[in-house]
Amino acid sequence: MRKVGFEVDERYLLGGIHHVTAITSSAQHIYEFFTNILGLQLAKLTVNQDDYETYHLYFTDENGAPGTDMTFFDFPNIPKGTKGTNNIDRVSFRVPTDASLIYWLDRFEKAEVIHGAIDKRFGKSFLPFEDFDGQRYQLISDEANVGVAGGIPWEKSNVDKAHAITGLGPVFVVVDDFELIDLVLRDVLGFRNTADDGSYFLYEIGEGGSGGSIIIEVNTDETAAVQGYGNIHHLALRVKDQESLNYWIERLKSVRLPDSGLVDRFYFQSEYFRAASQILFELATDGPGFWVDEPKEVAGESLSLPPHLFPGDEATKAKAAAALRPLDTSDANKARVDEWTISKIIGRPYK
């Protein structure tokens, strides 16, 4: 990669985190975990557009807004991933206040969700936790936050609205080569390095704050992570529209980063590129959104297949759907009226 010799055009600045995509061992269990425990909406149930035998689930706020979206693949027969360097290691979810973390600590205790203790980094309180695959997350308090606005809590959630998740926060990337990731973030993408805390380095983009942040952790002692379930697949950053995406496609080509060119995902348009030891990034447009092919009122209840995947080929479409593993999301738009509706997720009953 060669050094960029020009500043990012302010008309096309990146807007923050768009979505984060991870790999799960079970589409059914991750659906239950995210809707019943974390209180996020299944805004879209579809397939991985590069592997039709794999589900792609999108969990969002009430409005399906960019910046609130955690998504999952369930690749068949994939082994469990290993943690390590040169990896997107952890994703954050924003909650309103420090008191919200107390609420969630109690909720995790009742649900037997694996978690750590409440702590503070870069002036903001956080609570780390894991799902049944050992996927790493944290809740982060917006009490001291200024910057990219959060979303709207899902109306049908059983989570107290005063403490509900409102979107994605800082995404953690672990690297063994700080100079390279620093070059990509600052000189190519236009991030600002705004704070350091030991081996952690905070970078912000656009309006900044939790919704516009990446945290780099430098670790030269561990071996490289190996992709698999329980690990994050890629991190997507927000671009406003198609014109902005075209600008970024040309910019990435000019610095010779390995890239995909324009990819039409139907719900948004994308550009993928690899940087800093092959970590996968995506740039994604804010629209058109998840409900261009079905009403919001029934979204997530059944499989949606973008029309450009199988144009006029109903037999191939049916074959692709039949190859998917069983998954019941028929209650996707039903209100979660009781607090604990799951019988099993992490191998034992919930309280």
Image (cartoon, helix red, strand yellow):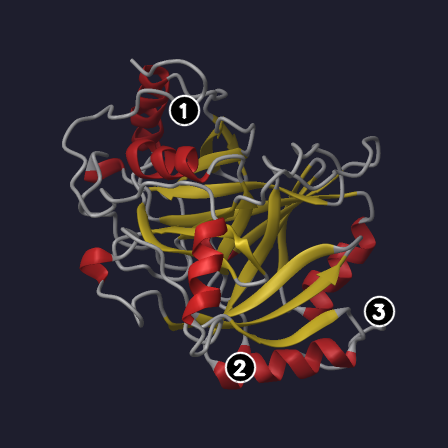
Residue located beneath label 3 in the image = 1
Per the rendering, the mark at residue 244 is 2
Q: Which of marks 2 and 1 is in front?
A: 1
Q: Nearer the viewer, mark 3 or mark 1?
A: 1
Q: Do the residues labelled 3 and 2 touch (CB within 8 Å)?
A: no
Q: Residue at x 35, y 56 (%)?
A: 303
Q: Residue at x 34, y 34 (%)?
A: 32
Q: Position of residue 281 (x, y in %)?
A: 64, 60
**Amino acid beneath label 1:** Ile
Residues 246 and 316: in front is 316
Q: Where is residue 109 in the image (x, y as percent from the top left)?
A: 36, 16
Per the rendering, the mark at residue 345 is 1
Q: How many marks?
A: 3
**Amino acid beneath label 2:** Ser
N-terminal-most mark, 2 or 1: 2
Distance of mark 3 from mark 2, alpha carbons? Answer: 22 Å
Left or right: residue 331 versus residue 264 is left
Distance of mark 3 from mark 1, alpha carbons? Answer: 44 Å
As helix, strand or loop, the secondary structure at mark 3 comes to loop
Q: Residue at x 55, y 33 (%)?
A: 135
Task: Reply above or below: 47 against 239.
Answer: above
Q: Where is residue 272 in the image (x, y as percent from the top left)?
A: 64, 67
